[in-house]
Amino acid sequence: MKKLMSIVSCLLLMCFVVTAFAACASEKPDSLVIYNWADYIFDEKLTDFKEYYKEITGKDIDVTYVTFDTNETMLTRLTQGDSNVDVVCPSEYAIQKLIEGNMLVPLNYFDEAKYTSEFSESVKNGYEHNSDNIEPGIIEKVSGAFGSLHIDETGETVSMVDYFVPYMYGTLGILYNKYAFMDLGIYDAEIMNKANWGIFFNDDGDGNMLSPGLTGNILMKDSIRDSYAATIFYMLERGMLDGRKNEHGVLYTDLSAGELINAVDDQLLDIVRRVLVNQKDELFGYEVDFGKDDLLMGNAIVDLAWSGDAMFAVEESWDKNIVNDDGTKGDYRLAYYVPHSAGNIWFDGWVVPKTYNPKHMEAIKIFINYLNRPKSAALNYLEIGYTPAIRPEVLQEDDDAMQILMEGYEYDFDSAEDREAFVEEFFNYVDEIDGSNWRYPFLSAELNDDNYRNIDTLGVMRDFGDKNKMVVTAWNYARSAGVSALPLLGWTVLAVAVALGVLFAVIGFRRWKSHRVITHTSSETQVE
């Protein structure tokens, strides 16, 4: 009987263990693999998202967060099948390439029924769709710039809007040291709005030098696309394109900003190359990520910058010791503006590559939608400086978002007076040089019709396609022009000669020292 009871007990124990393991297996966390730019989200550990995910689904989630530094790095990994990720955040032109290469899954974010069709009923009950929070101007801009895209492999024609969800956007413009410009006598709305993009070429707008003090203090982006756009806009302003026609017989001056920065015919490339070569005498150098730091440290005084980097730099440049005209203390040493003649506006957004894990689709969609909450957008803005794709009025109407932003800028959220002042400074700010709100260009264009700014003056750059190699060749030529092989060889020979001289000197010194030791020892021996 005891033996039978032992057997029964063992069987019961085994059943318990099996049941326990089965329960553990059923409670295995969901998974998600994210591929994003470095320093491009407020919480890389995604602790807040994990909590949000559990609220919506009742389940835990494990997140793998991987970063890239350029669109080209990301494209290479995806196209070579070197990265099995669920959701990626490219720029608009890279999204175009991925769509045309038949590498993305449509999301249909702006059709809630389609987007949530595969959600479980329990998830739908706690889910709130946030597509209405998105700035509609972004969708209009993207639709106008890219139109219908052709998928090469299938011949299908699709819209980019069905494949991506906007995340961040911004402008390309001029980050400059306001007080250095004052010292040079060029901190003036009329002077700067006449020079515009010519500031990067030390050109006052009439072909004359803007200021000798700019020479050697100008930074350009070590980025073919951004430098190309700035150069094209400068050439347009200076009349270098007057009377010239593109390969289709259309005057360059009749093209919109977007059409112009996407024009890459031989004639235009030749002019751009020559202009960039001539510009090099005015430059401090080229940079990608450190321009804002160089301006903060005083190494240079003007930089071709993205608005998010500019925001960071401006905030960091606060100097409490500056005495203003009204006797108050404190001002920003740096400032940023977008020339009113023409500019570039860009967008980054979330897409799903076909390499995604189908089991993760629900988590993918919840993650994307999570980022479009006002609270998430406010936290992102404070952390990374770029403008979230959320309508500004959505942020103003959400107390959580406003509290995050106001406290981040050291305003008292509970004060009605502070709230009014914050809205005026943050959302309704107008720059004294270009008369625009570069933080919210769509809002600025709508509210300031007489400030030279219109959203149509900001163009979106597409992928250069088959002509990309030509553009790269022109850029490489411009970057390397003026670097002669003979001087380089001379410096190399000199360096080798110096190194050999040092080497022989060290060997000679050691031999001399050794000889002295031997001689000294011999002398002592003789004395003894």
Image (cartoon, grey):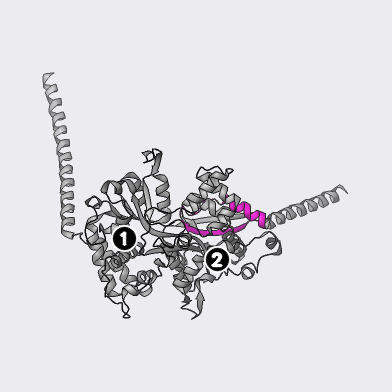
Task: Decide if residue 266 is in sight here.
Answer: yes
Q: Is residue 337 left or right of residue 424?
A: left
Residue of label 1: 197
Q: Is residue 120 left or right of residue 90?
A: right
In this picture, which residue range is highlighted in magenta? 30-56
Q: Find residue 118 and report its horizontal and vertical position in percent.
A: 65, 68
The quadrant holding residue 441 is: bottom left
Kindly identify the amino acid type of the residue bearing the numbered disc 2. Tyr
Q: Label for residue 356? A: 2
At horizontal 63% and vertical 51% (from top left) the residue drawn is 51
State yes or no: residue 493 in magenta: no
State yes or no: residue 52 in magenta: yes
- Mark 2 burial class by Cα count in 10 Å: few <14, some 14-19, many 20+: many
Report the front residue among 373 and 463: 373
At horizontal 39% and vertical 62% (from top left) the residue drawn is 452
Mark 2 residue element: loop
At horizontal 61% and vertical 55% (from top left) the residue drawn is 61
